[in-house]
Image (cartoon, grey):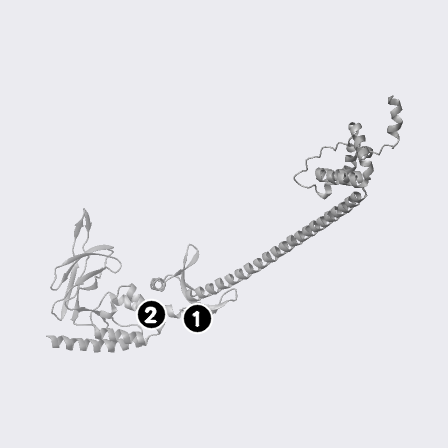
Amino acid sequence: MQSISILHRIMKAGHWVAFACGWLALAVPAQAGQYQLLAGQPNSVLVAARVQNAEQVCNLEISIQGQASVEREVQAPFFEARIDITPQDVESVTVTWRGRFKRVNDVAINACPTQGRTQFAVVEDNAALRAGWRNTFMAMDPAKAQCVRTALQLDRVRYEWFDMADREASPEDRKIQRAMSRCDDFVAQKKAWGEQNAQNFPCTLPGGLKTRCEGFFTATEKGKAVPITTEAVIRRQLDQQPWGTGVRETSAAKAGRQKQERARQAQLLAEEAAKVKAEEEARLREVQLALEAKAAQARERKEKAEAERAKRLKEIERKEEERLAKRSWLLKQLEKLKSDPKADGKAEEGKAKDDKPAADKPKEDKAEQAKPEVKLEAPKPEVPKPEAPKPEAAKPEAAKSEAPKVEPAKPEAAAPKEPPAKEPAAQAPKAK
């Protein structure tokens, strides 16, 4: 049983390769083929009924060899139904169908006026089929191979399990043939990127910036072209709907360019900030220099004023010294009394004693005894202030104003003249 199955697969694979070569040469095959089923595994396959009348929706009863029957509602125009088959250890599985009336929720569904059958081969693997399809795609233009592969995937055609050399007809035949023909038109249509690799090619943006670009497909929605995916444009191509192309900068190139632009902007901002900082520092330096100049001028004015003041004080001191040097002997004595009355009194007594002769002393004493009222009473000394008067306070006017206060102490009283020697004798007779 197993050897027969292997021989059957080899014969099928050889037939498929021979048919594929002929199909590639003719571009459109005379017939396509049928799915192969993997033993012991669920396989999704498609069956289609031929309905000749004007039915739009009808019901089919599908019988599967080795499995329970199922019912499917099919609709125009292709009346296709997808079923799952899990084959056991057999070489093939036969599937038949016929119309069957049914009612769902009081809604009647007519039976499809048709019947039919198909057969699926059961295999252990699909290595031979995959190799055949790989050779088929390699023989195509890369763009067309990608288009056909995408189109079959969009139509849910499991081409890795589809045997192009099988004599059985399949609903997938139409889809495969359509993918082949529509993809030829898709590749032939001119695109915005020309013959370049749509994924990455050099370009120049409208502003003159040279960068790397990629091509993309577009579709018109609400009067505006919007980008669409490759799958979407192939679907539109299969359905014969319009589409377009465009060119845009690649994400990597855009990210790199934006990074460079940000770096350039950051550099410009840094330079501008440095310029502003330098200007601000220069302005602060100017302000500081102006303040220092004002401070220097203020110091100069202060020093000049102090020098003038010192000069005036020296002049006042000089004038005071001259005034003091020119003052009378009496004023000098009064000032001495003010500063030290006892010392000045002793000095005055010593001076008086020294100035008078010894012979005259008794007479002077008698005269003083006879006229006690003419004794000079020294004025009470003023209490000296705790602090010596400042030089500028000793003005000439103040000194002059103090002189009249001591006028009662006349020089004659301070130093009485000696009476004439003959005066007592002359006054004696009058006493008699």
Q: Residue at (15%, 58%) from the top-left corner?
A: 70
Quarter of the rendering containing residue 255: bottom left
Question: In the rendered structure, which amino acid carries the disc numbered 1?
Answer: Phe
Q: Disc 1 on helix, strand or loop?
A: strand
Of circles 1 and 2, which is in front? Answer: 1
Earlier in the chain: of badge 1 and badge 2, it is: 2
Mark 1 = which residue?
201
Position in image of residue 134 (x %, y %): 28, 74
Above or below 102: residue 401: above
Q: Residue at (16%, 66%) from the top-left corner?
A: 41
Q: Is residue 408 visible?
A: no
- Mark 2 neighbour density, 10 Å: few (under 14) some (14–19) many (20 or more): some
Question: In the rendered structure, which amino acid carries the disc numbered 2?
Answer: Gln
Q: Report the Cα–Cα distance between label 1 and label 2.
A: 19 Å
Q: Residue at (62%, 54%) from the top-left corner?
A: 288
In the image, farthest residue toward the top: 432
Does 380 sit left or right of 124 as displayed? right
Q: Residue at (78%, 43%) from the top-left corner?
A: 324
Position in image of residue 313 (x %, y %): 74, 46
- In the picture, the quarter occupied by the N terminus is bottom left
- In the picture, the quarter occupied by the C terminus is top right
Above or below 250: residue 352: above
Above or below 85: residue 19: below
Mark 2 = which residue?
146
Nearest the viewer among 157 and 424 is 424
Does 92 sit left or right of 257 as displayed? left
Does 85 sit left or right of 308 as displayed? left
Q: How many marks?
A: 2
Does 282 sit left or right of 320 as displayed? left
Position in image of residue 273 (x %, y %): 54, 59
- Mark 1 neighbour density, 10 Å: few (under 14) some (14–19) many (20 or more): some
